Image (cartoon, rainbow, N blue to C red):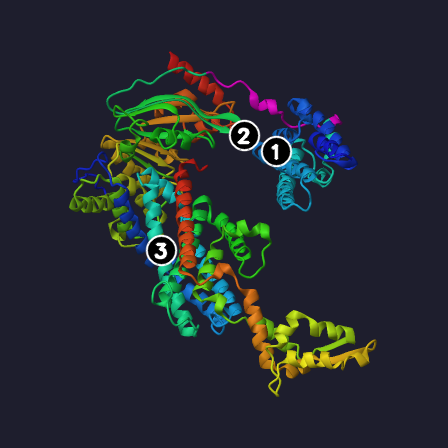
Amino acid sequence: MPEQMEQSVEVSGIGRHRGRIAQIRIYLVKFFRMFIYQNDWKVLPMAAAIGVIVAMVTRTNMFVTMEGTLVGSFAITLACVWNGCFNSIQVVCRERGIIKREHRSGMHISSYMTAHVIYQAFLCFLQTVLLMFVCVKAGVKFPEKGFITNWIYLDFGISVFLVTFASDMMGLFVSCIARTTTAAMTIMPLLLVFQLIFSGGMLALPQWTLSVSGATISRYGIRSMASLGDFNELPAVSGWNTLSKMRNAEIDHTLTVDDVVKVLENDTVRSRLSEIKTKDGLTMDQVADSILETGMLQQFEGGEYDLHIRLGDVLDAIGEDRVKSYVTEASRITGHNAAYEHTAENITRCWLILIAFAVGFVTLATISLEFIDKDKR
Amino acid sequence: MPQIVNVFLILIFGGGGVTGVISGILLSFGLWGIFKKCGVKPWHALIPCMKYYDMALCAAREPEGRVLFTANALTMLGNISSYFIPESSRLSVLSMAVETIGYIIYLIFLLRVLAALIKTFDVRKRWLILAFPLTGIFTVIFGWNKKYQPKWKVTDYQEQAASLSGANAKVMDKGLTVNIEDRSVTEFFKKKYLLRDIHMYIRPGSMVLLLGGSGAGKTTYLNAVNGYERANAKIVLNNKNVYENYRKMQYDIGFVPQQDLMRGADTVQATLTDAALLRLPMDFPAALRKERVTEVMKIFGLEPVAGSMVSKLSGGQRKRLSIAMEFISNPSLFILDEPDSGLDGVMARELFEQLRKIADQGKIIIVITHTPDRVIDLFDDVIVLAKDANRTGRLAFYGSIDEARTFFGKQRMEEIVMTINRKEEGGEGRADEFIEKYTEVQNA
């Protein structure tokens, strides 16, 4: 160690020190510097890899069918939640001791947190760009026109960014309240499961859990993405897919003439029959009328007939395309969800809620970190 | 059985039904005997939750006792609420969750406390096989069989501590005056004193050794002095009250923590530049700031590694960087918590010589070290903190190194620590004797 101890620079710690704004700059520069030197940059390739996996699953049906859009929105939202959480879950707790030391030396917690928010927003932005790029390259069929802006990629990108950022802030909050990285990583799976289950994207939730679901970022992520894809106007194919897989299923039933008459006289059935035309140009309800009027069925009254038929034969008799279009349309009507309404109001509302989540988590995170001095040694 | 009876049984015996009542009676009866043997009020065995806390006290496991108390309360709460909440209600899920979580924690901590209680009674560990599933029977055996006696009593810890001095150190224009009345925390509804009755004046230019056994309150003392963890105290540095002017004075006090709390993925130069930006006043010109960083790097021998990552530095370099970060604002009071931990003798000596030079510039240096004898010639004074009978950190001595040797009748500082350490820590257990003796010196 050198012998020199003389100090040529006149220094005193007394005086006005850097305020909050100036400190934000110090930490921001530090974080960006460490983005390069530390392992933070690794979240980018990870985001791209997650994007590839999600895109592989969602590319064919996303924005094409109701089911595909819902699954795609769910998968992308969860990927965003994962990315966001993973970005920040350890950033504060891993340097808690350092923060305590710097706080003791005059660092403002609010400046430190603001710098983190800006830095994390930057990471989320890059991840959004990566995810969008991967989705486009993988052939996800985005709607042709934007809805809120004129560019659908921007609309969708805003949703992706907001979900990632809100989740990132949630991770930051956990990182602020957890004393150690182990504690933070123990909480993380719980958070993800909570987001997954209560998103309402895949599982039908009981009525009482709806308020709990309202506290998840994923719910609003799925809503905004499905709404952008005009979910309610897309065809629903799962009903028809199931039906067509059952072509070889056999129907065994014992029919009486009364059963047939009741069916033919049913108003709903008749209105549906009126939409189906025979090869001769007659509608099916006209055929039914003539059967009923001619009294053809009365001669078989009291008799029981075993019906033994393949579902495929029924479909062929009615006409597969007709049944398909009917089932698809009926499924679409059943699948209609007001939460996924393709309106600017709905989408912007989701965005605002996601922003509110982010602001709320940052506020809680900052408040909790202000108590860092109370940490037990 | 009507709900209200069940609730009553749970509250009194800790469980409903015949089994619950029998095991509850056995436990309370057994604990009554154990509490009597261990010097705890026996009737505490009848108070729900509290009996578990006191059982942990008997086992000298007070922190576990707190958790056990809370876990038992949670389990009871969940159990009782299940009688009032219909199964169809979603609240029943919550009540079940509370009860389950509480019960898991209860079991784990009960196991810990029972294992410690077995140690207290100095019997074989295999007793745990009976104690854990049949706690009631275990407590009855150990509570009422005269063959089993505890190694210590809770009252052993409640011996009379040394009296308070009532002294007050005089405030001087220069130097550091410490008058700590007490530093306390409230834990589990009880006020616990961490430090009491510490009064001293430290001259500028002094390098002071802070000595004390584990848990004597050394770090608490340092934190109280630098204002980070405030005590009921008046700390005056160069005629300025540290607590009243904390925001301004925090830059005039450098605190180097025990661990090297720096970001490993930053360079030495960047670390010091950021430290300078944070610690130096705003009106300090940028050019001078740069010069100061270079100067400090030179002083602490960090110039050759200026561009290196902190994570790549050796233990000694890292320690020097940690000190340099605080030294950058040229503080009047410099506090170091075990700066030589992890350093070999030569490096530690070099570091302390460096600190001596800083002290010679009129600064006050207070250092905690666990290997003081190899560098004792560099120190002017020594502060000796010791745990009194109440486990409170007290001042056992403050004065020059030679005076300390005479006062304690020991040549080496490490021998002084052994003298004041408690017997269960392998020491001589003479802390209260020396605290009392020093109190008399102060009052003389």
Residue type of the residue flagged with mark 3 = Ala
- Where is residue B164 drawn, in percent x and y? 44, 16
Marks 1 and 2, how far apart at CA: 10 Å
- Where is residue A47 drawn, in percent x and y? 42, 63
- Where is residue B227 drawn, in percent x and y? 35, 30
Which residue is under mark 1? B69
Circles 1, 2 touching at the beta carbon (< 8 Å): yes
The verdict on a common chain for dots 3 and 1 is no
The secondary structure making up most of the magenta span is loop
Residue type of the residue flagged with mark 1 = Phe
Position of residue B302 in the picture relative to residue B230 (left or right): left
Q: Which mark is residue A121?
A: 3
* Disc 1 packing (10 Å; few <14; some 14–19; many ≥20): many
Chain under disc 3: A
Counting residues from the start of the chain, the first of labels 1 and 2 encountered is 1
Residue at the outermost front position: A293
Marks 3 and 2, how far apart at CA: 42 Å
Q: Quadrant of residue B17?
A: top right
Which residue is under mark 2? B188
Position of residue B66 in the picture relative to residue A309 (left or right): left
Chain under disc 1: B
How many labels, in total? 3
Marks 3 and 1, how far apart at CA: 44 Å
What residue do we see at 38% from left, 15% from top?
B167
Could you tell me which secondary element the residue under label 2 belongs to?
A: loop
